[in-house]
Image: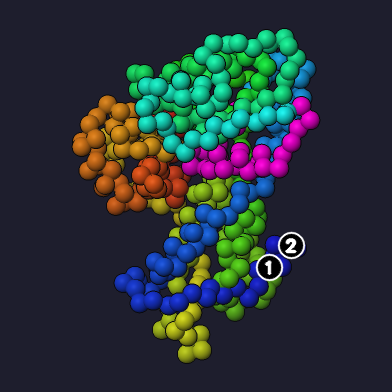
C-alpha cells in the first residue's frame, strides 16, 4: 500500500485534559503518548537492508582474504545504532557463520579498570591469542553493537580499545562487527590512527522526507490534521513538503526528525471552531513550521561537558565526572541546569544529548573547533 493512501481521515483520539499550556501546545499526556509510540517504532528498513547487504559482502571477502576480518558501522551520536545492528541480525543467517557472540552491554562496566578481563569473559576470549589463524575455521561472528561502552576518556580508559584493536588485528579466525558513532571514531582515529587497522567501514545513510513519513506513519494514522479547505491532492502535497523540510532540518537523522516532528504539532485554537469540532474528548491537531531548536547560552565548561556526552553517547554521572577530570558534586549542578533547559535527557540514570538539539549543537561545537560527526 502506498503511503499516500494512508494519509486520510487522521484524527487524534485522546482524552482532553485541562492543561497550563498555551492553546497552541499539545497537552503533556499527548506528547508523552506520542513519544512512547515513537520509541516503540522498529528501525527503518533502509538501515537494516544496507547493513545486512554490506555485512554479507564483507563476510565473502573474509573467506577469500582472512585479514579482511572486520566491518565497522558508523552513525550519528544520537541514532539507535545498537538497536539497528541487533535488528539486522534477527533471523539473519550466513552459510559460513555458525556462531554469533553478541556483547550485550547496556552500559559501561561498573569497574572500568577491569574492562579488558570483562571483554574477555563476555566474549569468550582467552587472555592470549590461542587460535591458529591458518586453520580455515572461519565460522564465528563477534558483534560489539556499541564501541562507546568499551572506553572512557580517562588515563586508563582506553585499555578496552587497545585490547580489541590488537586482537582484531591478530585474530583472523573470527569476524568482528562493530558499531560506533562517527564522532567517537574520529576521536579514536586522532588518538590511535585507528582507520589503519579497520579498513571496512559503513556510514549509515540519512533518511529522506518520504522515508521519514513512511517510518512515522504508524504514529500519525490515529490523527487528523487541520485541512484548511485543501483538497486531498493538495493535502498530500503539503504533507510531503512538510516532511521534506523535516528531513533537511534534522540532517536526515531519524532521532532528531521524530523529536522535531513532535515540536511541529500544535493544538487548534478551539475558540475559532464550532461546537461539533470541539468535543471535550478530542483534540484537533495541525502542523506549524519546523525549525531546529535554538541552543541556550552555553559556557565553555558546558561545551566540554556536552562534547563528552556526544563522545560517549550515553554516560552516567560518575563516568562523566571521570571523563572531565572533575568531582561529581562539581558537575551535578551543571547537569541539572542542562536538564532543565532540555538540551540533555536522562534515561535509566544515563545522560545523553536530546536529539532535537543535536543539529544546532553539532554546528555550535564545530564553531569552537571540537571534533564533530562525519555526517554532513
User: Would you say 299 lies left or right of 196 here?
Assistant: left
Question: Residue 2 bears which disc, if any?
Answer: 2
| Count of marks placed on residues | 2
Q: Position of residue 343 (x, y in %)?
A: 36, 47
- Figure quadrant of residue 49: top right
Q: Which quadrant: the C terminus?
A: top right
At 34% from the left edge and 70% from the top edge, which residue is drawn? 21
Whether the magenta-drawn stretch holds residue 91 is answered as yes
**Residue 106 image position (x, y, % from top left):** 47, 38
59 relative to 345 in the view: left or right: right
Quadrant containing the N terminus is: bottom right
- Give the residue number, with chain letter if any, for mark 1: 6
Asked if labels 2 and 1 touch by Cβ distance under 8 angstroms, the answer is yes
Label 2 neighbourhood size at 10 Å, few (<14), some (14-19), many (20+)? Answer: few
Tell me: residue 55, above or below residue 159.
below
Looking at this view, is 203 or 328 the one in front? 328
Q: Is residue 212 visible?
A: no
Dot label at residue 287: none
Amino acid at each position: 500500500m502506498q503511503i499516500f493512501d494512508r494519509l486520510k481521515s487522521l484524527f487524534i483520539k485522546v482524552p482532553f485534559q485541562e492543561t497550563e499550556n498555551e492553546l497552541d501546545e499539545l497537552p503533556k499526556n499527548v506528547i508523552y503518548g506520542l513519544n512512547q509510540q515513537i520509541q516503540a517504532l522498529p528501525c527503518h528498513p533502509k538501515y537494516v537492508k544496507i547493513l545486512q547487504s554490506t555485512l554479507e559482502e564483507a563476510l565473502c571477502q573474509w573467506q577469500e582474504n582472512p585479514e579482511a576480518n572486520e566491518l565497522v558501522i558508523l552513525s550519528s551520536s544520537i541514532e539507535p545504532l545498537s538497536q539497528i545492528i541487533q535488528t539486522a541480525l534477527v533471523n539473519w543467517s550466513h552459510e559460513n557463520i555458525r556462531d554469533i557472540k553478541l556483547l550485550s552491554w547496556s552500559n559501561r562496566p561498573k569497574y572500568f579498570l577491569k574492562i579488558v578481563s570483562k571483554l574477555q569473559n563476555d566474549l569468550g576470549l582467552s587472555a592470549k591469542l590461542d587460535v591458529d589463524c591458518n586453520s580455515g575455521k572461519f565460522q564465528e561472528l563477534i558483534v560489539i553493537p556499541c564501541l562507546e561502552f568499551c572506553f572512557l576518556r580517562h588515563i586508563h580508559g582506553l585499555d578496552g580499545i587497545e585490547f580489541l584493536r590488537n586482537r582484531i588485528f591478530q585474530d583472523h579466525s573470527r569476524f568482528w562487527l562493530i558499531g560506533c558513532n562517527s564522532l567517537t571514531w574520529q576521536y579514536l582515529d586522532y588518538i590511535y590512527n585507528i582507520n589503519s587497522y579497520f579498513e571496512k567501514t559503513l556510514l549509515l545513510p540519512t533518511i529522506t522526507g518520504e522515508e521519514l513519513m513512511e517510518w512515522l506513519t504508524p504514529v500519525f494514522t490515529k490523527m487528523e490534521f487541520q485541512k484548511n479547505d485543501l483538497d486531498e491532492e493538495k493535502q498530500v502535497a503539503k504533507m510531503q513538503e512538510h516532511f521534506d523540510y523535516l528531513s533537511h532540518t534534522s540532517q536526515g537523522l531519524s532521532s532528531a526528525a521524530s523529536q522535531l516532528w513532535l515540536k511541529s504539532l500544535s493544538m487548534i485554537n478551539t475558540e475559532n471552531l464550532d461546537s461539533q469540532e470541539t468535543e471535550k474528548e478530542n483534540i484537533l491537531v495541525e502542523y506549524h513550521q519546523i525549525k531546529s531548536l535554538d541552543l541556550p547560552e552555553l559556557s565553555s565548561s558546558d561545551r566540554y561537558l556536552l562534547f563528552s556526552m556526544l563522545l560517549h553517547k550515553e554516560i552516567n554521572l560518575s563516568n562523566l565526572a571521570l571523563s572531565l577530570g572533575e568531582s561529581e558534586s562539581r558537575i551535578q549542578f551543571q547537569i541539572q541546569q542542562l536538564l532543565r533547559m532540555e538540551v540533555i535527557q536522562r534515561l535509566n540514570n544515563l545522560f545523553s544529548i536530546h536529539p532535537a538539539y543535536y543539529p544546532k549543537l553539532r554546528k555550535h561545537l564545530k564553531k569552537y573547533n571540537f571534533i564533530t560527526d562525519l555526517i554532513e
